[in-house]
Amino acid sequence: MITKKTAPGARDTGLDALLDLDGYIIDQDGGYWVKIEAAVQELTAGRPHGINIACRCMSLTTIGLWGTTTRTR
């Protein structure tokens, strides 16, 4: 296990960098893109670190420009 030692009350710059990526969209070739979602949430048994992270991979050929499902092939 890797542990990071920080002084009490010090900001976690790694967490700040992760949260700064929230809403970031990476445009890929061929109409594909990846959207990153990151947010601090309440601590729960299922989320003891209090961070919600998701990467969504999408394609304009399956979602369409307005969110409707289409097939081009």
Image (cartoon, rainbow, N blue to C red):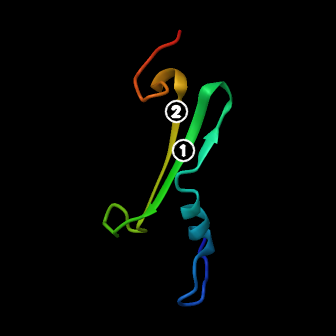
Depth check: 24 or 15 in front? 24
At a point 53% along the width and 9% down the height, the residue shown is: 73
At label 1, the amino acid type is Lys
Dot 2: few (<14), some (14–19), or many (≥20) neighbours within 10 Å?
some
Residue 41 horizontal/vertical position (percent) = 38, 65
Q: Residue furthest front?
A: 66
Relative vertical location of residue 18 with respect to residue 23 in this rendering, above or below: below
At numbered mark 1, what does the secondary structure look like: helix, strand or loop?
A: strand
Relative vertical location of residue 57 with respect to residue 53 in this rendering, above or below: above
At label 2, the amino acid type is Met
Q: Where does the N terminus fall, quadrant-wise?
A: bottom right
Dot 1: few (<14), some (14–19), or many (≥20) neighbours within 10 Å?
some
At numbered mark 2, what does the secondary structure look like: helix, strand or loop?
A: strand
Question: Mark 1 vs mark 2: which is more N-terminal?
Answer: 1
Q: Residue furthest top?
A: 73
Q: Is residue 36 visible?
A: yes
Residue on which disc 1 sits: 35
At a point 42% along the width and 29% down the height, the residue shown is: 67
Tell me, yes or no, whether the two marked residues, 1 and 2, touch with CB atoms within 8 Å: yes
Q: Residue furthest right?
A: 29
Residue 69 horizontal/vertical position (percent) = 41, 21
Residue 3 horizontal/vertical position (percent) = 59, 75
Residue 57 horizontal/vertical position (percent) = 53, 36
Relative vertical location of residue 70 with respect to residue 20 in this rendering, above or below: above
Question: Number of marks in the image?
Answer: 2
At a point 43% along the width and 68% down the height, the residue shown is: 49
Residue on which disc 2 sits: 58
Q: Is residue 1 visible?
A: no
Q: Residue furthest left?
A: 45
Depth check: 68 or 39 in front? 68
